[in-house]
Image (cartoon, helix red, strand yellow):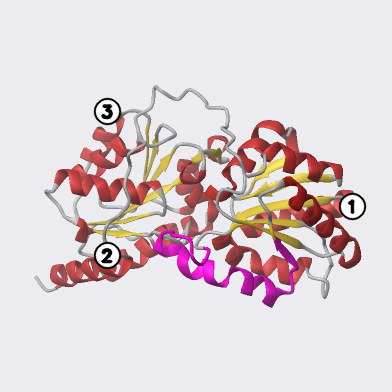
């Protein structure tokens, strides 16, 4: 493995002056390092990967220096448009380094949502005409690749990618903040599912894992009530919106995260414009990308309840304590509802993963909705 500090300093030697992106578990040590060590506006955690490419392009236009954009390979989809219609040599020819975590690498065990993306990661880069290297795990070998990267950028004035395998970077722990006064996300989810009926659509990452384990623990209601959005970060609220519209007699709750909500914040506008009264949108906000290392989001600096209100949600609440959440959930709501729950960062160390496959989850959820529809 190579040290995050070593890689960062090598980039600085080549005058890389700006870092942006969406954190990934394979990049979390490097992302943690730049979060701790990069000052001021030289590092921005972007709301999505396409926005990160835009930020990188703006930095280059303003300074003439090379930026770095980090992302999980699933984020390539969000970045394709600005990479091809803005940064490409056929358009504005804007150089930048892409640091891409290779989830689902062929031959390496990973979760189902990463398998297809892992198979096509390098194929996508080839199709886009973006030169790349799979970063080596020794400093001597990586040195040569870094030099090749900057030589290529100098010749082409275009993006260059480093594809990052599991365990490429040595561990680096981000500095922790004290948020012990808040409830845990898992405690909040348990309170929610005990007080709301109907069906649930949960966002990717820890929230879906915790929802699954709470169903295992409590047993009163089984997994068929829940659609676990194991991939497609930021789209759970849109999935839930469509379910709510098609099944107006069923209460639908979206369990969202702050990072996921920010990634496609425009979904708030669509939900608020349509106003299904059987829909409750809950954002569990810990101000962090918890599933990929705990790097901060910008959620602490914005007012999500006010955004929901401006978009047309009917009932708006914020819970800072377990008692707050209980009181909110006890209210009878017949309007589109938004609830922000402030929760602690982190999850318990023994948190498991769903034992059912995505196909099994989908089939059970659809059958449950069908059975409810014909009663």
As drawn, the residue found furthest toward the left would be 375
Task: Please provide percent x and percent y for residue 147.
Answer: 84, 54
Tell me: residue 282, above or below residue 115. above
The residue sitting at 47% across, 63% down in the picture is: 114
Q: Residue 323: which disc?
A: 3
Note whether 195 is above or below 208 in the view shown: above
Where residue 375 appears, x then y in whole percent? 9, 70
Front disc: 3 or 2: 2
Q: Residue at x 29, y 57 (%)?
A: 277
Question: Which numbered disc covers residue 361?
Answer: 2
- Residue at screen point 56% across, 48% down: 167
Res. 86 image quadrant: bottom right
Number of marks in the rendered image: 3
Query: Considering only order in the chain, which callout, 3 or 1, is on the residue closer to the N terminus?
Result: 1
**Residue 18 located left or right of residue 335:** right
User: Mark 1 or 3, which is nearer the eye?
Assistant: 1
Where is mark 1, residue-wise?
A: 64
Give the CA distance from mark 1 to mark 3: 53 Å
Extent of the magenta region: 105-133
Whole-angstrom CA distance, mark 3 to mark 2, is 32 Å
């Amino acid at each position: 493995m190579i040290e995050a500090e070593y890689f960062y300093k090598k980039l600085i030697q080549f005058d890389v002056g700006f870092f942006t992106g969406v954190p990934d578990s394979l990049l979390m040590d490097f992302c943690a390092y730049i979060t701790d060590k990069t000052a001021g506006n030289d590092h921005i955690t972007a709301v999505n990967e396409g926005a990160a490419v835009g930020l990188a392009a703006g930095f280059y236009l303003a300074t003439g220096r090379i930026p770095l954009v980090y992302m999980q390979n699933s984020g390539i989809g969000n970045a394709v448009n600005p990479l091809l219609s803005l940064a490409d040599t056929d358009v504005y020819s804007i150089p930048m380094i892409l640091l891409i975590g290779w989830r689902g690498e062929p031959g390496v065990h990973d979760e189902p949502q990463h398998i297809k993306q892992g198979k096509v990661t390098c194929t996508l880069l080839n199709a886009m005409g973006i030169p790349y290297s799979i970063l080596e795990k020794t400093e001597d070998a990586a040195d040569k690749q870094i030099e090749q990267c900057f030589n290529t950028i100098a010749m082409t004035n275009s993006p260059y990618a480093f594809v990052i395998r599991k365990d490429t970077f040595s561990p680096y722990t981000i500095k922790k903040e004290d948020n012990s006064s808040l409830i845990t996300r898992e405690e909040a989810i348990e309170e929610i599912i005990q007080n709301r009926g109907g069906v649930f659509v949960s966002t990717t990452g820890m929230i879906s894992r915790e929802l699954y384990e709470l169903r295992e623990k409590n047993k009163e209601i089984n997994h068929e009530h829940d659609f676990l959005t194991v991939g497609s970060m930021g789209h759970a609220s849109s999935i839930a919106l469509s379910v709510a519209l098609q099944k107006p007699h069923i209460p639908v709750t979206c369990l969202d995260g702050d990072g996921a909500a920010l990634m496609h914040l425009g979904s708030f506008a669509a939900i608020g414009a349509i106003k299904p009264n059987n829909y409750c949108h809950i954002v569990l906000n810990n101000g962090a990308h918890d599933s990929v290392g705990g790097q901060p989001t910008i959620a602490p600096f914005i007012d999500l309840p006010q955004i929901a209100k401006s978009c047309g949600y009917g009932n708006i609440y914020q819970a800072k304590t377990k008692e707050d959440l209980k009181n909110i959930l006890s209210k009878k709501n017949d309007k589109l509802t938004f609830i922000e729950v402030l929760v602690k960062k982190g999850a318990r160390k023994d948190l498991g993963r769903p034992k059912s496959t995505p196909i099994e989850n989908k089939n059970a959820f659809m059958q449950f909705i069908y059975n409810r529809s014909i009663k």
